[in-house]
Image (cartoon, rainbow, N blue to C red):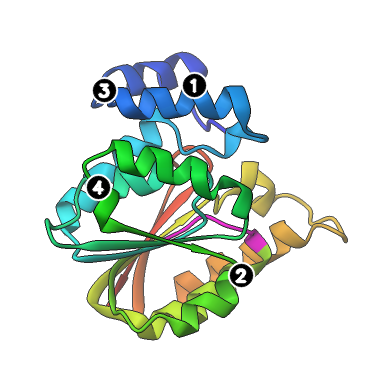
Amino acid sequence: MHFIPDALDDYVAAHSEKEPQLLQQLTRETYQKILQPRMLSGHYQGRILSMLSKLIQPKTILEIGTYTGYSALCLCEGLKKDGLLHTIDINEELEDFQRSYFDKSPYGRNIKQHIGNAIEIIPKLTTKFDLVFIDADKPNYVNYFNLIIDKMNSGGIILSDNVLWSGKVIEKLQPNDESTKALIEYNKLLAEDPRIETVLLPIRDGLTISRLN
C-alpha cells in the first residue's frame, strides 16, 4: 500500500540507498518460489530498517515474523559485531530457505532461527532486547507487545509493521475483520502506554517506532 502517488514513491525509492545484491537475489527467488511474495519488506522499507538498526546499533534484536529472511538481513546490517538476532516464524517449510540466505550473508552466525508459535517461544527467551521488529499475524500484535515490553533494555526500540493496514484502520470496521480490529486496538495501546513514546510513520503500509522510556 502506497500513500503517495506511484511516481513520487518511485522517486523516493530511486533517491534512497540502493538494494544490496544478495537482497535483490532473495527478492527474485521469493517471487519465483514462495507464496504471498508481497509479504516481503522490499527495497525501500528494507533500507529504512537497515538505517534504523545502524542508528540504534543493537546488540540484541528480536524479529517476530521471519518470512523469507529479508527484513532479518536488513536489521543485521546495524547489529554489533558480536550481536545476535533471534527471529521467529511459524512456517517450518521456510526454515531452510531462510538459512540458505542467512549463510550467504556476513551475518549467518549472528542469526538464531526459532520455528513455532511466537506466543510460546518469546517467554522462553532469556535475552533482553535493544530492538524488536513485529511483522507477524495482526490479531496477536497486542499479545506480542505484552510479552516483549518487559524484555526490552532501557531505551529499546519496538518497530511495528503494517499498522495502517491499507487504510482500513480509519474505515468503517467490518464485523468479521479481526486483523483491522486488532490493529486499531494496538495503535491505541502504543499511543497511550506511558512506558513508551511512539511515532507512527506513513511508510508503505505504516511503520510505528516506539521507544521505551
Local secondary structure at mark 3: loop
For residue 76, side relative to residue 163 (left or right): left
User: Which residue is disc 2 drawn over?
Assistant: 117
Q: CA distance from mark 1 to mark 2?
A: 28 Å
- Label of residue 107 in the image: 4
User: Which residue is disc 1 drawn over?
Assistant: 28
Local secondary structure at mark 2: loop
Q: Position of residue 192 (x, y in %)?
A: 47, 77
**Mark 3, mark 4: which one is toward the viewer?**
4
Asked whether disc 3 touches disc 4, contact meaning CB atoms under 8 Å apart, the reply is no
Local secondary structure at mark 1: helix
State whether residue 61 is above or below residue 20.
below
Local secondary structure at mark 4: loop
**Mark 3, mark 1: which one is toward the viewer?**
1
Task: Using the rendered view, name the quadrant where residue 71 is placed.
Answer: top left
**Mark 3, mark 2: which one is toward the viewer?**
2
Mark 4: amino acid: Tyr
The residue drawn where x is 65% and y is 53% is 169
- Label of residue 18 in the image: 3
Sooner in the amino-acid sequence: mark 3 or mark 1: 3
Sooner in the amino-acid sequence: mark 4 or mark 2: 4
Q: CA distance from mark 3 to mark 4?
A: 19 Å
Sooner in the amino-acid sequence: mark 3 or mark 4: 3
Sooner in the amino-acid sequence: mark 3 or mark 2: 3
The residue drawn where x is 49% and y is 21% is 28
Kindly give the residue lying farthest to the right in the view shown. Answer: 175
Mark 2: amino acid: Asn
Magenta part of the protein: which range?
A: 133-138
Asked whether disc 1 touches disc 2, contact meaning CB atoms under 8 Å apart, the reply is no
